[in-house]
Structures are given as structure tokens and as C-alpha cells.
Amino acid sequence: MAPTIFLLLALLSIAGKGGGLKLELIQRRLSPGNVSPMAAKSQIWPETSEFMVKIAVGTPPTEVHAILDTGSDLFWAQCRPCAKCYRQTNPIYDPSKSSTFRTLSCKSPQCHLRGSGAACSGTDTCKYGYGYGSGSTQGELATEKMAVTSRSGATTPFSGVVFGCGHNNSGTFNANEMGLIGFGRGAISFVSQIGPSVGGRKFSLCLMPYNTDPRISSSLSIGSGSEVKGPGVITAQLVRTADQTSYSLTLTGISVGKTLVPYSTSGPPAKGNAVLDTGTPPTLLPKELYGRLAAEVRRHIPSKPIDDDTLCYKDNLGDLVMTLHFDGGVDLRLSTVQTFNKMPDGSFCFTAMGVDDKDAVIGNSMMANFLVGYDIDNMTVSFKPTDCTKIG
């Protein structure tokens, strides 16, 4: 879910040189007693077409269920008092009832961390505004005590984490989605803030296939011990682009069976043309590429699609295998678990679609049943085929 940061009042420019200093300030604010050689762990579970993470926020803690998003940086939650909040099933976080909540001043370096969406004008309070394709949030930036807890009950607390206290939130969020937690590469992302206290800015996650029972949870690991290793691991080098949030790779083509569909028919693709985004369910491909790919998929599947406008089938997908080809000779083999979603009516629908864009987004459906490790400091991403319904 790639964000568009918009201005509430006046956007404050953030010099890249200052980013390191500001991140260092956050590292010092994290309690030294919380430094751990082991990964911090939380649970992941499916919510419609998104994936949720549980975070304890405040003192006493409020349990926040937030959308896990590698395509953005800011962690925000709905906050009282609400100027405009969407309906929420669980209690909305109330900062007035937390002894550890602190609003940020516009003079605070933490207000201006890269990716914060901060804006200050006529007030000392650090305001923010963040927009997505599916909604937006506005409020104030603050610090708070937070904790993550694994399924086994192991809890890792963190102090002074910067987040967005959202008082004006709207969009397609449902009543179980209490906010969104950004796991991008920016300085304000949750992993960038807490990573140094648990062994590094790295994490791994395992997303379950679409329509998995929401009572089944998987695992999110952050820091030392989250590395993806062992037989079958495929590692690719991430590409640095002007977008300092996203995890970008260079996709050179997609094979359907043994037939290669090049990314472009007019020359080599641009570096960093594909982004890994857990907050976007479908894989989004340039329309021209999608058209060529869809034709090849139809040719390889023995049965006919339900209708001519979609790649949905009642059954008999055959033994279709697709491969994503990345620069550097990295090939990621996909089964029908990643390329077709099993729908509630029992049909199977292709997990990619065509869009008016020159770049691609690899969505969460196509990352299902891979243990994926992201290493921000070393700029790598690793994939290991895994039954994600069994590693919680």
C-alpha cells in the first residue's frame, strides 16, 4: 500500500543527511534494558485480503490490530477524541488514559523523520497527514510505550516509539482494522525504530494463502534471529531508488511453464521496476505486460476460464508453474498457491491484474507460503518456500 504523503499545513523538508542523526536519537530513547539478542515476535493473521499484526500500545496497554504494510513507513492507530473515525469493533486507543503517551513538538527531531508526513504551522504540536490509494489518516505524532507478543507468550517491550495518533481517518478500512503499521525502509517505520534494540533492521514474515481461516496465525520476527536461511532459500539484492520506503527489485520477465514473457518488448526494464508490497493484495503489472502474460496463462491451462474478461477457473488448473525472473539470475518459482486465489465459491482467480503504470507491484497473494526475510541494512530479500499455516 504505497502512500502519498500530503500536507496538512506546510511540509517540512527533511535533509537526507539529518536522517541518520534522527534515527540515532530514536535508538537512544529505546530503553537499554530492552536490548535483546533474540528476535522480537508477533502474530500475523489474515483479515479479508490484508494481514494483521497485534501491537500493545500505552500504559495500561490497548491491543491494536494493524494492517501489515511493507509499502509505507508510518505506524498509526485510531485515537480518541475522534474528529472522524471509521467504525471499529475493538476499543479505540485513548491517549488520555495512558501514562506513557507524549505528543511530539515541532522542534523535536523525531517529528521530522523521513516518512513521517509531518507538517507544522501555527502550532507547536507535530501534526501529520498520510494518504493511501484506499484511504487517509490525519492526527498528531507522538511517542508511546509498545510491546509485541509471540504466540508462545514471549513479550518484547519498547519505549519511546514514534507513531501517528489518528483523529481523522477514512477509507476502505473495515471494523477489525484499527490502524496500519508501516514496515518500509524509512527512518520512522516500526522496524527502523525498534530494530537496533533487537539486533538489526531486519525482519521476516510468512503470509498465508488467500481465504485461510482467520483463526490460523503465522509469525512476524524482527531483529537478530529473523534471518531466512537453509536449503531452498533464494536471495536477491534490493535496488536503491528515489523511493526510500519501498523494497524494490528489477523484474526482467515472467515464465509460464518454459515460455518466457519478457517484462518489456522495447528494451531492458528500468532498475527497481518491481516493489514488494504486503499492503496490496493483487500483483499489479503494466497493462501491456499483463496482456501478454494472460494470453500465455490461458494457453497453458487445459480448461476454459469462467468468462472472457477474467482469469477465473472452476477447476483443473493443471500443473501450471510460473517463475519470476529478477536481475542477477534470481528466479522465484511460483505454484498455483501463489498465482491463483481460491475464492469462497470454490473457483480459482489469477492473482495479477493490469494497470496503467510502467512499474510492477508484487502483492501479498503472490508472496503466500514463502517465508520472506527483509534486511534493510544489507539491502537483501530472501524467499524460502514454507507452509505458512504451520509456523506460528
Image: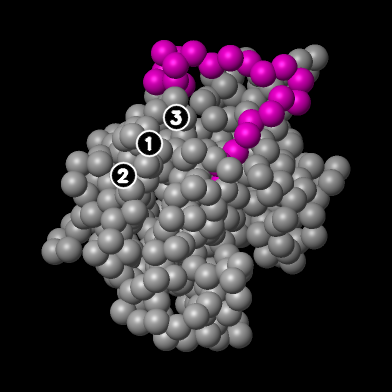
- Kindly identify the amino acid type of the residue bearing the numbered disc 1: Ser
- Sequence-wise first label, 1 or 3: 3
Kind of element beneath mark 1:
loop
- Sequence-wise first label, 2 or 3: 3
- Kindly identify the amino acid type of the residue bearing the numbered disc 2: Thr
Residue 10 percent coordinates (x, y): 72, 17
How dense is the environment of label 3, judged by Cα within 10 Å: few (below 14), some, or many (20 and up)?
some
Whole-number angstrom distance, CA of label 2 to CA of label 3: 22 Å
Kind of element beneath mark 3:
loop
At x 79%, y 55%, the residue is 86
How dense is the environment of label 1, judged by Cα within 10 Å: few (below 14), some, or many (20 and up)?
few
Magenta segment main secondary structure: loop
User: Is residue 45 rendered to the left or right of residue 238?
Assistant: right
**Residues under numbered marks 1 and 2 in contact, where contact means CB atoms less than 8 Å apart:** no
User: Is residue 392 rendered to the left or right of residue 10?
Assistant: left
Return the residue nearer the eye: 208 or 87: 208
Residue 252: image tag: 2
Return the residue nearer the eye: 358 or 244: 358
Residue 380 percent coordinates (x, y): 27, 42
The answer, for residue 157, to whether it is visible in the render is: no
Whole-number angstrom distance, CA of label 1 to CA of label 3: 28 Å
> Residue at label 1?
266
> Residue at label 3?
244
Q: Is residue 123 above or below residue 136?
A: above
Q: Quadrant of residue 271?
A: top left
At x 25%, y 41%, the residue is 327
Residue 38 percent coordinates (x, y): 28, 53
> Magenta span covers which residues?
1-22
Q: Is residue 181 magenta?
A: no
At x 54%, y 16%, the residue is 14
Return the residue nearer the eye: 133 or 20: 133
**Residues under numbered marks 2 and 3 in contact, where contact means CB atoms less than 8 Å apart:** no
